[in-house]
Image (tube, rainbow, N blue to C red):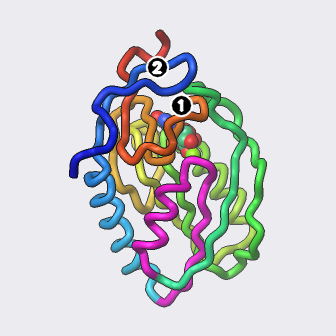
């Protein structure tokens, strides 16, 4: 598939340079594979997909459609954990609206970096006694693997680079891009 978007773009204001890292069709292939795995594991379980806003929105829509199972969908939001590219403290700013006691919950996030958000959310939601809880993330960076954080479903492993596109932003911009881009300059320049 040829992309609508060029290999080199700028994102944000002031603009930062990004270069294409994954094409839309490569991402979509990996997402469908993950959806098949979820389908197999959650057949007849009527799972609850809980998306972590805002970055999850594209992956969530693709996963829920392709998983093709009766399910419930809800969202949770953490504080703007990253302002631009810097990480900070985790705080909940929007809770889920539904009861998850005795339900099979699948937390859906855009990317796992340190794994701190996942750790926090698992602790936060386990108190409500779901029947089970797993996590699906579209992307994963190496830090969480080094820290021994287990994620149940991962579509694509990435190098330790800052990325935008497919739902992920840089300072609020770039979420609409169907391809994935990496920052094309040193992070702290
Ligand atoms: P963690 O808590 O695993 O360190 O970070 C998770 C959150 O940080 C992700 O859900 C995502 O919102 C944000 N994040 C981590 N790496 C990146 C990245 O490369 N690009 C963008 N745009 N957000 C990221
Ligand atoms: Mg996120």
Q: Are marks 2 and 1 in contact (CB under 8 Å)?
A: yes
Q: Is residue 117 shown to the viewer in this render?
A: yes
Dot 2 surroundings within 10 Å: few (below 14), some, or many (20 or more)? Answer: few
Confirm whether the magenta stretch covers residue 65.
Answer: yes
Give the SS element for disc 2: strand
Crowd tier of the residue under label 1, counting other residues whose Cα lies within 10 Å: few below 14, some 14–19, many 20 or above: many
Which residue corresponds to mark 1?
A: 170
Q: Nearer the viewer, residue 13 or 63?
A: 13
Q: Is residue 114 visible?
A: no
Q: From the viewer's perspective, is residue 25 above or below residue 175?
A: below
**Which residue is disc 2 drawn over?**
16
Chain part drawn in magenta: 44-68
Residue 89, percent from left and from top: 70, 34
Q: Position of residue 169 (x, y in %)?
A: 53, 37
Q: In front here: 146 or 103?
A: 103
Residue 49 among magenta residues: yes
- Front residue of 155 and 133: 155
Q: Residue at x 68, y 65 (%)?
A: 126
Tag 1 secondary structure: loop
Tell me if 187 is positioned left or right of 52 in this view: left
In the rendered image, the residue lying farthest to the top is 189
Which residue is depicted at the point 51% across and 61% down? 60
């Amino acid at each position: 598939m040829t992309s609508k978007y060029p290999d080199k773009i700028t994102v944000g204001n002031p603009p930062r340079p990004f270069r294409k890292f994954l094409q839309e069709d490569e991402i979509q292939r990996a997402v469908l594979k993950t959806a098949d795995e979820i389908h197999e594991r959650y057949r007849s379980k009527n799972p609850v997909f809980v998306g972590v806003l805002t970055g999850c929105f594209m992956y969530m829509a693709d996963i829920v459609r392709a998983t093709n199972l009766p399910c419930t969908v809800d969202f949770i939001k953490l504080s703007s954990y990253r302002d631009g590219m810097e990480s900070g403290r985790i705080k909940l700013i929007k809770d889920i609206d539904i009861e998850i006691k005795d339900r099979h919950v699948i937390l859906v996030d855009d990317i796992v970096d340190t794994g701190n958000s996942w750790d926090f959310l698992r602790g936060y939601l386990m108190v409500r006694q779901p029947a089970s809880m797993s996590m699906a993330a579209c992307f994963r960076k190496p830090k969480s693997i080094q820290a021994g954080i287990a994620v149940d479903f991962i579509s694509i492993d990435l190098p330790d680079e800052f990325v935008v596109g497919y739902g992920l932003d840089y300072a609020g911009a770039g979420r609409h891009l169907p391809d994935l881009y990496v920052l094309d300059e040193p992070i702290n320049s």
